[in-house]
Image (cartoon, rainbow, N blue to C red):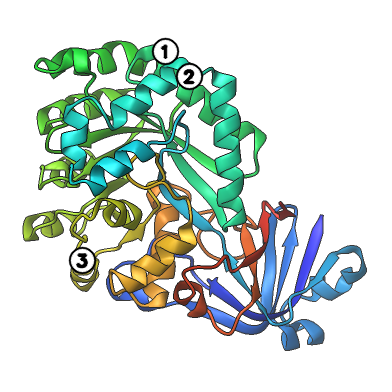
């Protein structure tokens, strides 16, 4: 199938030459666009793009004119086209909301205090254990469809609300069904080390043994995960715990990721870099040593603005990290306890408003760099010939700066995944 989108006011985040896998340092402020543009899609891929004047003359892509009558044609006058967001950190599959804990936080309890008394992740684990796979799938599908309507085209989804072997497998099977039955590009992350069950408090090394010796072999046997993850932070898993789990996961072919430095400087960044993690996520607590450790590594520092906003946490020093030459990605952390929103448009706005990124830096952080953080930047994250045709058409807007500026409205009018409108 061929689709031709014409008269695009501005085609945003294009790559006409050599494609980058990520943007870092000063590159994050660079973003190419084409005004008065066309975009040609064929068989789910981007076939060509350029200026309308070039298309009319046949100079850039004669194939557009050669068989134009057979293509679905869309007139995008007054509208812009962006690559869809890539959300590289979510906990989309869960069984219950946790608004009662929201009230506890208003009354002054910290996230760590709630977790210590059996709330937080453990509350979600209880509800997950009680829910059927079908119930979890139906709930997750509704959330996924909402994310698509808001402009997200790729998502990493973590387990972690199981904390028993059977519940973790149940979550990962739901993620597999979402990948098989929706047009969303999905990566699965095994996060058995998300919290410490109450019965393992005081001897959590036994729970780490369970993750390594029972959960991981089952996950690997069924081919249920792309990544292995650990919540390496104060009150959760230690560096030693994390190393053991990552080493085991790597043996099964899983790429490491890390939850790090949400509560405290935990050593999570350093252990992530040591084991070649594709990303280290959260990073509300960062020092010079962590920034230096990330320099020259292949690990993507990933900030989760929704979590910091919802929990009133310190802001990760995004500006300092970029000025030091690092790449930065920003994802939603969609989950029921600490970031109950999948709206990547809001994350884009927070990147500018709270972290002082320019619109160009914020767009790189939520498209190309988040694609890198989930291992798909060869196929997604920019508008480039040969990449997947995952993009959205905006409503009539004045400029691409309007996307982060108008934080309270949905600017997306139409979404295309794999070249097909959804």
Is the residue under label 2 in contact with that under label 3 (CB below 8 Å)? Answer: no
Dot label at residue 170? 2
Q: Nearer the viewer, residue 60 or 389?
A: 389
- Quadrant of the rendered image containing residue 273: top left
Classify 126 as above or below 82.
above
SS for dot 3: helix
Q: Label 3: which residue? A: 321
Measuring 24% from the left and 19% from the top, which residue is drawn there?
197
- Quadrant of the rendered image containing residue 51: bottom right
Residue 277 visible in image: no
Classify 339 as above or below 314.
above
Give x and y (percent) for residue 222: 49, 17
Which sits earlier in the primary sequence, circle 3 or circle 2?
2
Q: Residues within 10 Å of mark 1 (few under 14, many from 20)?
A: few
Classify 110 as above or below 227.
below
Residue lying farthest right? Answer: 69
Dot label at residue 166? 1
SS for dot 2: helix
Total label count? Answer: 3
Measuring 26% from the left and 17% from the top, which residue is drawn there?
212
Give the distance between the C-alpha atoms of the residues marked 1 and 3, in whole angstroms.
40 Å
Give x and y (percent) for residue 90: 41, 43
Is the residue under label 2 in contact with that under label 1 (CB below 8 Å)? Answer: yes
Q: Nearer the viewer, residue 25 or 184?
A: 184
Give the distance between the C-alpha atoms of the residues marked 3 and 2, in whole angstroms.
38 Å
Q: Seen in the image, is 76 located left or right of residue 257? A: right
């Amino acid at each position: 199938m061929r689709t031709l989108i014409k008269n695009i006011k501005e085609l945003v985040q294009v790559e006409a030459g050599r494609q980058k896998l990520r943007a870092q340092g000063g590159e994050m402020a660079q973003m190419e666009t084409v005004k008065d543009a066309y975009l040609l899609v064929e068989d789910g891929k981007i076939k060509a793009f350029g200026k309308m004047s070039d298309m009319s003359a046949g100079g850039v892509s004669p194939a557009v004119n050669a068989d134009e009558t057979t293509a679905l044609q869309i007139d995008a006058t007054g509208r812009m086209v962006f690559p869809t967001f890539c959300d590289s950190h979510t906990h989309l599959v869960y069984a219950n909301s946790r608004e009662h804990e929201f009230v506890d936080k208003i009354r002054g309890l910290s996230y760590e205090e709630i977790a210590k008394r059996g709330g937080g992740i453990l509350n979600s684990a209880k509800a997950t254990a009680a829910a059927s796979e079908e119930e979890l799938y139906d709930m997750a599908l509704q959330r996924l469809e909402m994310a698509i309507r808001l402009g997200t085209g790729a998502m990493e989804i973590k387990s972690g609300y199981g904390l028993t072997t059977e519940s973790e497998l149940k979550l990962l099977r739901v993620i597999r069904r979402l990948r098989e039955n929706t047009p969303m590009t999905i990566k699965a992350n095994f996060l058995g080390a998300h919290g410490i069950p109450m019965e393992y408090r005081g001897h959590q090394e036994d729970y780490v043994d369970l993750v390594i010796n029972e959960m991981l072999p089952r996950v690997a046997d069924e081919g249920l995960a792309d990544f292995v993850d650990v919540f390496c932070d104060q009150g959760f898993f230690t560096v030693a715990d994390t190393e053991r789990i990552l080493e085991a996961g790597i043996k099964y072919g899983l790429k490491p990721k890390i939850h790090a430095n949400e509560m405290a400087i935990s050593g999570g960044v350093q252990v992530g870099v040591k084991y070649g993690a594709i990303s280290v996520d959260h990073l509300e607590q960062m020092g010079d040593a962590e920034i230096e450790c990330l320099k020259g590594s292949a690990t993507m520092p990933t900030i989760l603005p929704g979590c910091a906003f919802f929990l009133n946490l310190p802001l990760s020093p995004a500006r300092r990290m970029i000025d030091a030459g690092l790449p930065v990605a920003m994802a939603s952390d969609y989950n029921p306890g600490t970031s109950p929103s999948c709206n990547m448009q809001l994350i884009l706005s927070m990147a500018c408003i709270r972290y002082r990124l320019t619109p160009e830096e914020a767009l790189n952080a939520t498209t190309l760099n988040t694609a890198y953080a989930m291992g798909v930047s060869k196929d997604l994250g920019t508008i480039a010939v040969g990449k997947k045709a995952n993009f959205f058409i905006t409503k009539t807007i004045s400029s691409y700066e309007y996307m982060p500026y108008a934080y309270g409205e949905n600017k997306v009018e139409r979404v295309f995944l794999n070249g097909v409108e959804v």
